[in-house]
Amino acid sequence: MLRYSTMETPAGPFTLVVAESGAVRASGFTTDVPGLIRLIHPSLRENTEPVDDVGAAQAAVRAYFDGDLTALDGIAVEQHTGGEFMAHAWLVMRDLKPGDPVTYSHYAELSGRPAAIRAAAAACARNAVALIVPCHRVLRTDGSLGGYRWGLPVKSWLLDHESAA
């Protein structure tokens, strides 16, 4: 059974979908739980139930917004794709530090495939665990924001929050 909870944050409503193990399978700046569930790989989907609090992941998100920018680092996530590069790229993404965003080309390089800029961008686009797997820390090659599933104002807010600390 997957549990989910939506909390208010300074960047907008944020929903976490968490497995019984405590691992986050999806998260995003939305109240659309069915839409968020669709981001989870079919092999990881289960029945869902709303709860007031999903535990450690929710506490870590609160701590992040309260200024502890490393609070999310220890939260387990479960994502799945058919590709080895994507899984590796998500692990690399978790190592991107707050306040130090990288470009898609640098992210591709960090992921071990410098020429795979589109694949690096796809890893960002297919990330179902926003904020915890910090795709918001990847920018266009010219330094502009690029895209973000949850909107550029949210991405901008997160980057400002991380650079102010």
Image: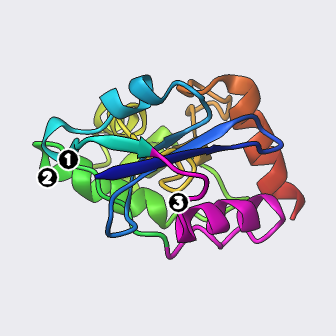
Residue that numbered label 1 is attached to: 44
Residue that numbered label 3 is attached to: 54
Question: Is 97 above or below relative to 133?
Answer: below
Give yes or no for residue 72 being in the magenta stretch.
yes
Who is closer to the viewer here, 78 or 84? Answer: 78
Q: Give the range drawn in magenta.
A: 50-74
Q: How far apart are the two marked residues, 3 and 2, measured between alpha carbons?
A: 29 Å
**Can you say which quadrant of the picture contains the C terminus?**
bottom right
Q: How far apart are the two marked residues, 1 and 3, measured between alpha carbons?
A: 17 Å
Query: Three-letter amino acid code at disc 3?
Result: Val
> Residue placed farthest to the bottom in the image?
74
Query: Three-letter amino acid code at disc 1?
Result: Leu
Q: Are marks 3 and 2 in contact (CB under 8 Å)?
A: no
Give yes or no for residue 98 being in the magenta stretch.
no
Query: Three-letter amino acid code at disc 2?
Result: Glu
Residue visible at 33% across and 58% down in the picture: 19
Is residue 134 shown left or right of residue 34?
Answer: right
Where residue 117 appears, x then y in whole percent?
35, 36
Tag nearer the camera, 3 or 2: 3
Q: Are marks 1 and 2 in contact (CB under 8 Å)?
A: no
Residue that numbered label 2 is attached to: 84
Tag nearer the camera, 1 or 3: 3
Where residue 98 appears, x then y in whole percent?
68, 62
How crowded pointer 2 is (Cα within 10 Å; few <14, some 14-19, many 20+) is rated as: few
